Image (cartoon, helix red, strand yellow):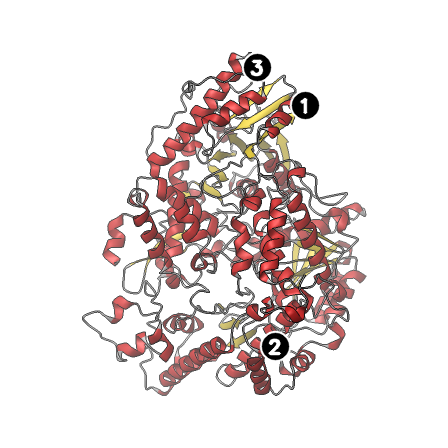
Amino acid sequence: MLHDALRTDPFPRRHIGPSAADQAAMLEALGQPSLDALIDATIPASLRTTRPLDLPAPRDEAEALADLRVLAGRNAVLRACIGMGYSDTITPPVILRNIVENPGWYTQYTPYQAEIAQGRLEALLNYQTMVADLTGLPVANASLLDEATAAAEAMAMALNVAPPRDTRTFLVAPDVHPQTLDVVRTRATPLGVEVLVADPATHDHAARPVFGVLIQYPGTFGDVRDPRAAIAAAQAAGAITVLACDVLSLTLLTSPGELGADIAVGSTQRFGVPLGYGGPHAAFFATRETHKRAMPGRLVGVTVDSQGLPALRLALQTREQHIRRERATSNICTAQVLLAIVASMYAVWHGPEGLTHIAARVRTLTGTLAAGLRAAGLAVRTARFFDTITVDNVDADAILARARAAGFNLRRVDGRTVGVSLDETTRFSDVHAILAAFGVQATDAPVTPDDLGGLRRTSPFLTHPVFHRHRSETEMLRYITRLQSRDLSLAHAMIPLGSCTMKLNATTEMIPVTWAGFNGLHPFAPVEQAEGYRTLFSDLERWLAEITGFAATSLQPNAGSQGEYAGLLVIRRYHEARGEGHRDVCLIPSSAHGTNPASAAMNGMSVVVVKCDANGNIDLEDLRARAAEHAPRLAALMVTYPSTHGVFEESIRDICATIHAHGGRVYLDGANMNALVGVVRVAELGADVCHINLHKTFCIPHGGGGPGMGPICVNAALAPYLPGHSVVATGGQDAVGAVSAAPWGSASILPIPWAYIAMMGGEGLTHATKVAILNANYVAARLAPHYPVLYTGQNGRVAHECILDLRPLKATAGIEVVDVAKRLMDYGFHAPTVSFPVAGTMMIEPTESESLAELDRFCEAMIAIRGEIEAIARGDSDRNDNPLKNAPHTAAMVTADTWSHPYPRSVAAFPARWVREGKFWPSVGRVNDTHGDRNVICTCPPMETWTASS
């Protein structure tokens, strides 16, 4: 380890945007003598931690990469033949280099500003079309977290849409993947749902009514059974049917829709997404047209823009938790956009013929393996299969040992049973090696299995031209680049979204993600083969506990919303263990994130809203009244800190003490952790559990709306209840069930926060927090004369973000917050968070990674827009036909033969000097949300639709 004095290029200097001179200039503008003085004026002294972060000395970038290489090298990457819903795959290099490793794709934000996200939205529309075609169901969402949580969402949706009957029983087939059953059981318990494991083919619906049925297709042991009779019987009894499918098998097997299923779920991992020791992967969810408004997840739809031309947007957003809150159909901010894009591009690259060829080859290899085993007299249980067979009456441990020695991991079902799953990476020589592990002499002749017993697919799929036009790498590269050019990312400009912390995703942090030592492991590989991961997990758990002040950490939740859910689940189990399982009331401030009440509802809790005062702080008197009123049933308080309004509430300790006095526990939402690291420890405030958005504070990129990670940290009293797993032992002594399919969630992206913390060290992390607060206060101070800052804390300061009040503009100029958001696109910026947590406002979070020059550029854009608004208010600019109401302006609009607006084209297209130097053009005009929701189209329209708009 180099001594600090010998370092020539310390990483914090690269991560933190403003230089020392810039920081001094900003502090002078704020009237503060030093950065520490600003922090003293911003954060009440009573809340500050007195103990510096006890973290290892910072590594430089070369050291961090070298240390991660050592960890990756301690993971043994064997050929994965375990199956259970995970398959090895080949990521086409053109996709790997130009999407996975490309910051133009992985640093994008969720596509809520559709006009500057058309490329990503098109890739997601391709994904939905792919899923709809393969499943034979008309409506598919734009991805969920993993197959297990998708199945759990299907159960919840079935409960909501099934005909009203006196049953809360959900039937699960015995050959569902074990991790899926685990997550379904976890999700079922708080909802008061009983999970019944029984054969759907023989279940007596009259004797034991159920509201839904889950069938694995093919089953976890490889069996391909015809589910039509079971589906028909369930539906005749009023139950909703769910098929959990293997996506590649659907190129050969009759689709779920044709079989009569109501819902189809599964994982698209084997479409080019590495195993990654469990994630991140994109799950799919498809259903019938009648259920689209009850379907969880984001949905990309086709609409028109201000010019009447086709455009894409997120459709039916009124289903989402930020609007419906505790009435949301699910906590549906959970998505895996980047991974869904990879899977969709895999289908674009291979097309239907290529996918069918891969599937047929895998099935032939599996047939050859099965024939060789049967010829040797071994009992192959699986009669009809796709890629998996199960062998009975063998010495499982001996066979697995020989297979491992040859470089293969097989599935140990039990001491006398072995499962084998093949995939697109399998070669005939691999089949020979696996046969040898069973003690069988190989044959050179491939064996094509018998027919699929009436389940062979005959219907077409992927017929849209997009799945046929990009066979050469030249065409594929250009298609990917064309879509990328339609999306604004951190590679273009700052994305100042409040509460979303769009900070630097450093290249050094990202590099290890694609190393085979991290992304090549199956999540259920023997634990002794993942020693490098064990060390990485241990380091992260310890470091996050030190940062928050808590006693223990779970890395399993693979989204921030999952972290919320898991945190409340742990609190729920804590109360049950104390004989107080009746506690089911969750207090939530009116200013809370929409995910909070949705998470509470998913935990079976009753939400009671606590008022906020005129300054945006929690109303202490109302809190005390609600806590006392519900004391016998009080389970928890969910609170965001710093507050959702961007200030440090001085009463947070009193708030926590009030909840504890009435028997409840405090869950702290860690969305705003970027204002706390190194200066405030959450546990010292009195909280009992918090989640941490690793895709915010700790630099995992947002990936256009996923991947994310939301681990939870808890105090010693809650540690025994941290999430466990049915396949790999993890969690506390009295663990709640699994909340994600894989034991450590999306493990392959955990090297990113590991590298960030390792390179920043305690002092670097603390300084980053202080600069984030500095940047936010600088922006607030520059913009306050033009837009009132809605909430401030002590001494008129804000935390790491600020809220600008744009509501008065409607009365004076007829301008609404959405107009300012769209006009910012003409200046080359993504809008801040709009109308949250207060309608008609903008919440701005600049983060510590943005330089003073970029902050000034953004402020100048906002000030210039304010001048445009003043011109409208004075009557110098038309109230209805002005640059804001018509924004954003596309290249097609400003280069059209006619220009009918009263302001010049130059004002529309080049409103600031820097725009002329490097213009980012929105590819569509302002989208029509109402049209899109009234005319829901969620699969690829005919190509001539796009041609007409190009």
Secondary element at image label 2 = loop
Q: Report how far apart the C-alphas of labels 3 and 1 lie in the structure.
A: 15 Å
Q: Report how far apart the C-alphas of labels 2 and 1 lie in the structure.
A: 61 Å
Q: Nearer the viewer, residue 922 or 769?
A: 769
Marks 2, 1: nearer the viewer: 1
Q: Nearer the viewer, residue 161 or 386?
A: 386
Is the C terminus in the top left, top right, bottom left or bottom right quadrant? bottom left
Marks 3 and 1 close (CB-CB < 8 Å): no
Kind of residue at badge 3: Leu
Which of marks 1 and 3 precedes in the sequence? Answer: 3
Residue identified by numbered label 2: 798
Marks 3, 2: nearer the viewer: 3
What is the x, y in percent for residue 329?
53, 49
Task: Tell me, yes or no, if residue 560 can be seen here.
Answer: no
Above-or-below relation of 853 to 213: below
**Crowding at mark 3 (Cα within 10 Å: few <14, some 14-19, many 20+):** some
Kind of residue at badge 2: Val
Which of marks 2 and 3 precedes in the sequence? Answer: 3
Residue identified by numbered label 1: 415
Is the N terminus in the top left, top right, bottom left or bottom right quadrant? bottom right
Residue identified by numbered label 3: 378
**Crowding at mark 2 (Cα within 10 Å: few <14, some 14-19, many 20+):** many
Secondary element at image label 1 = loop
Kind of residue at badge 1: Gly
Secondary element at image label 3 = loop
Taking the spot 44% from the left edge, 29% from the top edge, the residue there is 362
